[in-house]
Image: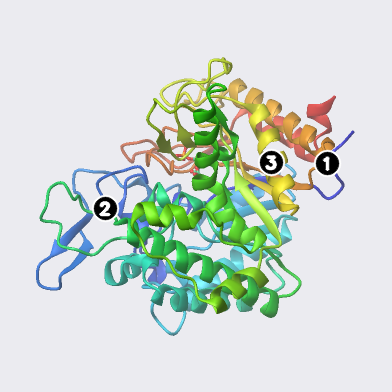
Amino acid sequence: MSFPKNFLWGGAIAANQYEGAWLEDGKAPNVTDILVGISSKDPGLAWNEETKKYEMKLNPDKVYLSHEAVDGYHRYKEDLKLMAGMGFNSFRTSIAWGRIYPNGDECEPNEAGLKFYDDMFDTMNELGMAPVITLSHYETPLHLVTEYGGWSNPKLIDFWMNYVKTVFTRYKGKVKIWLTFNEVNALFRMPLVAGAVLTIKDPKDPSDPIGSTTEQDKWDAYHNILVANALTVKACHELDPDSQIGCMMTASSTATYPYDCNPVNVMGALDTQRMNIFYMADPFCLGIVPTYLKRVWKEENVVVEFTDEELQLIKENTVDLLSFSYYRSTTYDVNTNLRVDTGGVVCKENPFLKDKAPKPWGWAVDPTGIRYTLNILYDRYHLPLFIVENGVGLDENLNENNTIDDDFRIHYLNEHIKNVHEAIEDGVDCIGYLYWGPIDVVSAGTGEMKKRYGFVYVDRFNDGHGTLERALKKSYNWYKDVCTSNGESVLK
Ligand code: BGP
């Protein structure tokens, strides 16, 4: 009745939300550097009439917190010690592609960037935490977006392969688990961030805002990313056969429940699952491009053609494991508009879910949803599953004892971890649980510091001020008990 031996316990962050140092040691801007938060509809871009291209133009009235973030670039050694102090045996972060190839299209890598991650991965290994490394967590170099239009351009495949081969070779033996693209299945909901797709066209028409993307460009990006993912799996297996490589999906939408038994809602829930996870996860995990997409392409009036060689490549190079984020479930109701944020799709409120995170975010809490998600994904793919993001963001302030009694976070975790265990009892091969944001970082969605996930508090605020000092919340010791008892503390 316990968690498997060697179960991976730890936490996950991303370079663009943690490191800061956005232009240090040769790094050039990446796509998230021009956004206050990824839900922002207002990217820091301007049209250049002469070059007929977009270029970076940040809004001077806005605070781009991610540029300094929580200064992880200079403080990761102390932070990693705090993580190891909780008994983590693994830790997930990403490589900022732009530290290695600043513009993305250079032939030679930036040694300063390579050295930085050498030291970081060495530190993790010395502390007994296996590095779980995302190759791109919304970190495509901005130049590849403004110059080439991002992933809708097949040239990105070559630039990407140059980058991934460099890091597979350099970090061989140091990294045992690689993940390709963070939440790349959000491509259709958030094309600029998840797919780094930008339709390069003069945005004179006010109904056509900067950063908007044509359907054709999104599908071209889908095509190129499927090919790139397969080539990446192949390269990883060839260059570092001792490591494993997985894809990373936002899987909250797997738990899309029909709002009621109206067959229209049942079918709509299936379509929502397909669009938000299976479009991508089927090719990555099963090596097949779903047949129903032909109809989707016809209805959306786009042309998507895979060559026989590409289909063969996708078939032969499926991932070793499926990693995913889960934050909450949703419903599908035909009469209610679907919205999205970083937690997944939002539709009509589920009347059975009384438990909610406090406002302003107020995400519904559905621990059974993580068990359901694990079961659905395992039944479909029969691959090892790895939860690499789950957690809750809260608006918190230190009390007079220089700590935070984050009982709601403890409650959230307790319920979710119990349900992960239920899924394992159901027969699911779940290899690990990484909590999202074990140290406060800049929120992906809103770009705020106010939305805190950490077990470790960081003194920084929405207006950019703060000492950046770290303090431990109540959940720090609670999660330490979980990790060091291999989950027994939540099961007793
Ligand atoms: C996921 C992202 C993370 C993370 C998380 C929480 O979609 O992969 O980068 O931030 O969502 O989202 P938020 O920070 O918006 O609460």
Crowding at mark 2 (Cα within 10 Å: few <14, some 14-19, many 20+): some
Q: Return the residue at label 1.
A: 427
- Return the disc, 1 or 3, that comes first in the chain's sequence: 3
Q: Are marks 2 and 1 in contact (CB under 8 Å)?
A: no
Name which residue type carries label 3.
Ile
Above or below, 316 against 333 in this view is: below
Name the quarter where the C terminus is drawn: top right
- Secondary structure beneath dot 1 equals loop
Q: Is residue 8 visible?
A: no
- Image location of residue 133, percent across then percent down: 61, 60
Crowding at mark 1 (Cα within 10 Å: few <14, some 14-19, many 20+): few
Name which residue type carries label 1.
Gly
Asked if the residue at label 2 sits under 8 Å from ligand 1, the reply is no
Check residue 376 in the rendering and tell me which mark sits there, or answer none. Answer: 3
- Secondary structure beneath dot 2 equals loop
Check residue 212 in the rendering and tell me which mark sits there, or answer none. Answer: 2
Please tell me which residue lies in front, 66 or 291. 291
Q: Is residue 485 left or right of residue 366?
A: right
